[in-house]
Every structure is written in structure tokens, then in C-alpha cells.
Image (cartoon, rainbow, N blue to C red):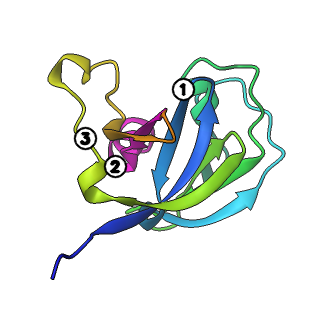
Amino acid sequence: MEYKITMKYFICALDAICIAIPGECTERVISVSRIQSSVCERDEQNIFISLSLLFKKENLSTPHGILLKSKNEGEKVILLTPPIDIDLEIFEKDIYTVPMALTEKLRYFSGACFIEGRLVLILNTEKLLEAYSD
């Protein structure tokens, strides 16, 4: 009997590529109306990280916020994303590791796959949180 290991991802588009946010790293998806001018901004209780600004896509709207699971109690990290197109299961065997030559450029990603001919990069939320939260 063959076991197929899958994981749920939230998929959003950034121009020609898509970003997959692991469902196991999220608490919930919320609607947001925040306008942000830098990649990371803070208020008294929250850290907001803009996926669009991280990739220098200033003109993309960010109507969704994904509340990420955080190791720090009392700290909420909200990933601002373009519209989430779909949530789906991706087979582990279909995800390829990021080549060493691209690890600096793609440092916030743990892998990549293709869905319907489109490149999908798998977000490494742990690395993103290390870079932008205290």
C-alpha cells in the first residue's frame, strides 16, 4: 500500500509565479484593509509583513491577512497577501528543493512545484519569522 503525504497550502499569485503558504503554519485567514509602505511594520500588538512589498510588487492589493503561528506569546504576525486564489493539497513528492545557486535570492522559500504549468514557490514561514520578528 502506497502512502501519499500531502499538506494544505494557501495559494496566491504574484505576477508570473504563485506563492504557497503552508496551512500547518497558519492559524486563520482574515480580511484586511491595511495600506503598508514597508515590508514589515509593527503596532502595539501585531507585526505585519507584506508579501507583495517583500517581492517589490508595490501595486498589488493585499486584501487577505494570514495569521501565522508564532513561538512568541502575545505577538501576532500577520502576513499580508494578494488575493488567495485557492487552498489545495500538494503531494510532498511533487515539491522540489530550491537549488543552492538560488538560495540567497529565494531565501524565504523551502521548495517549488508546478501546478497547471505555473511555478509555485513554497514559503518557509520559519525563515520569514526569523528575519522579521524579534
Task: Indicate which disc, 3 or 1, sits on the residue closer to the N terminus.
Answer: 1
- Marks 3/1 in contact by CB < 8 Å: the verdict is no
Q: What residue is rendered at 37% in x and 63% in y? A: 71
| Viewer-proximal residue among 51 and 97 | 97
In percent of width and height, residue 68 lies at 51, 58
Q: Name the disc covering residue 126, or none.
A: 2
Q: Quadrant of the C terminus?
A: top left
In percent of width and height, residue 124 lies at 36, 45
Q: Name the disc covering residue 54, or none.
A: 1
Local secondary structure at mark 1: helix
Residue 56's quadrant in the figure?
top right
Q: What residue is rendered at 40% in x and 45% in y? A: 129
| Viewer-proximal residue among 39 and 59 | 59
Looking at the rendered image, the disc whose residue lies closer to the viewer, 3 or 1, is 3
Q: How far apart are marks 1 and 2 (CA)?
A: 15 Å
Which residue is tagged 3?
Answer: 96
Q: Is residue 44 magenta?
A: no
Compared across the picture, whether 8 is left or right of 77 comes to left
What residue range appears in magenta? 118-134
For the residue marked with disc 3, what is the amino acid? Tyr
Local secondary structure at mark 3: loop
For the residue marked with disc 1, what is the amino acid? Leu
In percent of width and height, residue 25 lies at 43, 62
Q: What residue is rendered at 78% in x and 45% in y? A: 63
Residue at the far bottom: name it.
Answer: 1
Q: Distance between the residues labelled 3 and 1?
A: 22 Å
